[in-house]
Amino acid sequence: MRKPVEATSFSLQCSNELEAIEPVWRALEATPECPVHQTYDWCRGWIIETGTKPLIITAVYGSGARSGETAFILPLYIARHGPLKVAKFIAAPFNNVNFGVFSSHCLDDANPATMLELRKQFSQLPLGVDFVHLDRQPREWHGYRNPFSHWPSVENQNRSFQVTLNGDFDAVLDFGNAKRRRKRFRKSERKLDQIGGYEFIKAGTQDEAHELLEEFYLQKSERFSFQGLPDVFGEPDIQAYFHRLARESVGQERKMLEMYAIRLRQHDGLICAIAALSSKGRDIICQFSSIATGPTEQASPGELLFYLLIRDACESGANMFDFGVGDELYKRNWCDVETRQYDTYLAITPLGRAGTLTARIATDLKRFVKSRPGLFKVARAVRLWITNR
């Protein structure tokens, strides 16, 4: 008879301070499996610029040879949803993937029994929230199973898309239709050459990063307005947050946010496409992108920009180019990996139990609509009509 797997003992602590655990945090985040969105600088910038209250949960081994060793850090902040207080991953609205900050020992030890016991401990912590919402989590990341995947979860309505690189751009092109892709690239170049040519630029100074971000905000605002969508980048504190990340990335090996663009050589240096990338280890992730409205759209500058970005990523030795969440045709045309993501909910109060039930139903409904193109098209049309009334 197989012996039951025993639960690993952890001691949980919660704090509203980041600085006290900075050295441990930076040591744990150095591992490849920690996404850029859970690194110290990414989280610290959000707390500073948005003024939100952090809720940092730390797990320490309670017994055995690793007693006193930090097992993981869960960087959360407290957000309000109507009458509810919700603990979410720091910067959750803009994170493309969440995985927590784990030691390799913890990832090995996180069996179902351990995580069940940990769930009980979580519910007894003085968190000051109604429920915990851990969103956009992959089941596996960099070969490790996500410990929180042992908790009940619901599939997120969005998936993320990745390109496997391994330094071979020709192989990346061959995944789709290489001949067609090269033809589209040359066609874009010809159209831009007809209006004076273009430059593929990377922000090398803080001023250049600032200028490209400001142009991105303008382009995105115009695009959201046209689509009848709220401008998620419109708030001053959100704009200041990304300015901070871009500013702190200049001259650093790890890039929290690095700005790239296609700029015309004439027409007052019009910026016709922009992308913001983060890099950590050998992973590159596109945080957001935009294109200018007007005559340059017919040249498909966004496709041109991604062609150049992915080619550069291959040449730099990157393993993966991640397009982030959201199902778009241009992503599917490039990517060979599609990642399902999951949301975990943990009710703390009676009101939180009602809140988690509502949130789960809403997520299921969104996923149902998005998985049916015809229905999703109708839903978007209705939303645009309501917005423009």
Image: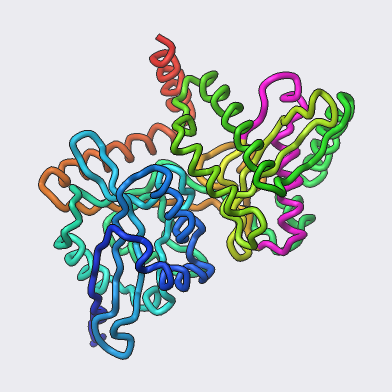
Quick check: is 324 in the magenta stretch? no
Residues 126 and 273: in front is: 126
- Residue 31 against residue 54 in the figure, above or below: below
Tell me where the magenta segment starts and ends, as one range: 290-318
**At which x and y percent is residue 161?**
56, 49
Please give the name of the residue rendered at 47% of the width and 73% of the height, measured from the top-left corner.
27
Judge left or right: residue 143 versus residue 279.
left
Please give the name of the residue rendered at 24% of the width and 70% of the height, measured from the top-left corner.
12
**At which x and y percent is residue 248?**
57, 53
Residues 310 and 21: in front is: 21
The image quarter containing residue 384 is top left
Residue sitting at the far bottom: 65
- Residue 272 against residue 58 in the figure, above or below: above
Residues 18 and 293: in front is: 18
The image quarter containing residue 103 is bottom left
Judging from the image, the colouring scheme is rainbow
Residue sitting at the far top: 389
- Say which quadrant the N terminus sits in: bottom left
Residues 164 and 122: in front is: 122
Quick check: is 296 in the magenta stretch? yes
